[in-house]
Image (tube, helix red, strand yellow):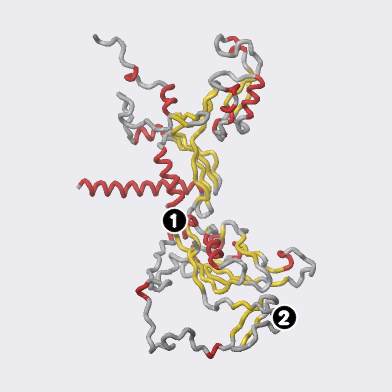
Amino acid sequence: MPREEYQVPTGASGAQRGATRDAHESRAQMSYLCGDCGGSVTLGKDALVACPHCAGRVLYKERTKRMVQFEAR
Amino acid sequence: MHPTKPAAWTNTPDAEEIARRQTVNINIETVSNNISTDYPGHFPGEDVEFTIERFREAFSVNFHQNDQFLSSFSLVGIDASLSNAFRRILLAEIPTLAIENVYIENNTSVIQDEVLAHRLGLIPFKGGREGLHNFLKWHKKPEVGEDPYAGCFDWNTVRLELNVECTVNPDASPAEDDPLKAYNNAHVYAKDLVFVPTGKQEEYFSGENAIMPTNPDILIAKLRPRQSINLAMHMHKGIGSDHAKFSPVATASYRLLPTITITKPILGADAEKFAKCFPKGVIGLEKVTKKEAAKKGSGYEGQEGQAKAVVVDAMKDTVSRECLRHAEFEGKVKLGRRRDHFIFSIESTGQWDSDELFLESVKHMKLKCKKLEQQVINMAR
Ligand SMILES: [Zn+2]
C-alpha cells in the first residue's frame, strides 16, 4: 500500500486508540484444525489448548475465508 | 612508371574469395573471421551497397520441416542483424493470451498459493484464431486505487475456473496404494481448468475453438482426501518482454549452416574413423574411382577401390569439432559456418502455428521500420 493511503486511526473510528486487539466478543469461539487427527476444534476463551478427539496439542489456524488475489508471475 | 598489371584488389572477387568472406572459420580452439565485411567501403573498388533488388536476388527461404507446432527453415543471404531481430521479435514481442490474475477462494493443498498461481500462469493455452488474434485486445492494468475489475471486458479478459476436491474413492480396495485409484482427483491437471465464456466470447470460442490448454496433461497440483482448490483466473494478452509466459515460442533459435571441407584425401580406416567423428549421415564413404587414382598429385594415386570420406550432409553436423582432436586428420579438414545461411527452428507453444509465427515476426519488423522512418522524417524536417 502506498504511504499516501495510510490514515492515522482516530479515536472516533471504532477501537480505542492504542488498543492492541479488537474487541471481537462476537467471535470469542475460534475454530482450529488439529495437527494430529485433522479434526476441527473449537476453543473458548480460556479453554485448554488440546484436541477433544485425540488430545493432540498442536492446533493450526484455519485459512482465511476471504478471496486472495495473486498475479500469476 | 606505369604499372603493367593493375593491383590485385581491383579485380572482382573470385568464387574462392567470396567463399572465404562468407565463411566463419572454426578452428581447434578458436573461431575466426567472424565479422561481416559486406558493407560499402570495406573492399576498395567494390560496390556492395544495400539495395532491395540485390537483396531480393540473393535472398532465399527453404523449408526443411513444417509441422503445425515445429518448423525449421533456412534463410539464405541475410545479415545476422536482421535474422537476430526476427528471433528476438519471436521470443519477446508477439502477443499471446496467458493467465495473469488468480483469485484464490480456497487452497488447502500442499502447494502454496503463490506457487500455484505461478504454475497456472505458465500453462500454454490455445483457442479460436480469429478470436485470439482479432477479437481479443489489450487489457490495461488498473492503477493503484482504481477499481481492479472496471477495465475487464469480454474483449480483453478471459475467465477460467478451477474447482477440485479430493475424495476417497469408495470403489477402491482398502489396500490400494496408487493414489490415482484410491482417491478421486488425486492429481489436478491442466484439463481440469474450466473456461467460462462471457459476452461475445461465445461466438469466437465455442466447440473446438474454446480456450483450453494446449497440453491437457500438465500436472498442476497433487491432492489428498479433504484437500481442495477453488479459484478463478483472468487471462489477458501480453508479450514475452513483460513475462516469459507470454512468449509464443518454446524455442526460436537459429544456427549457421556448418561447412566441412576435406582438403586432402582421407582414406581407408581413417575415413571410417573420420565418419565416426560426426553425427550419422554427415560423412559418407565412397570408393576412389579409377580416374581419381590415375590423376597425379591428387593424393589418390594407386588407391583405386579404397574407401574415401566425402561430405554428404553438412547441415546435420553439430560442429562438435571432434575431428580436429585427432592427429591423423590434421591439415586434411576445415570446419566452418556459412555466415549468411541461418537455419531457423521455431517451436510454437500452441497459440500460433509455427510458420505463421515467423510471418508475424516479419510483420512486426516492418511495422518497427515504418515507425522509425516516420521519426527520421520528423527529425529531418
Ligand atoms: Zn485431534
> Which residue lies under the disc numbered 1?
B239
Q: Position of residue A38 (x, y in %)?
A: 68, 76
Number of the front mark, 1 or 2: 2
Which of these two is toward me, A69 or B173?
A: A69
Q: Position of residue B1 (x, y in %)?
A: 24, 9
Q: Amino acid at mark 2?
A: Cys
> Which residue lies under the disc numbered 2?
A54
Asked where in the image residue B218 lies, by quadrant, the reply is bottom right
State whether discs 1 and 2 lie on one chain. no
Looking at the rendered structure, the secondary structure element under dot 1 is loop
In the displayed structure, does residue B150 sit left or right of residue B165? left
As drawn, B289 above or below B354: above
Looking at the rendered structure, the secondary structure element under dot 2 is loop
Q: Does the numbered disc 2 mark a residue whose Cβ is under 8 Å from ligand 1?
A: yes
Asked where in the image residue B293 lies, by quadrant, the reply is top right
In the displayed structure, does residue B174 sit left or right of residue B86? right
Which residue: 53% across, 70% down?
Answer: B232
Which residue: 70% across, 77% down?
Answer: A37
Q: Which mark is residue B206?
A: none
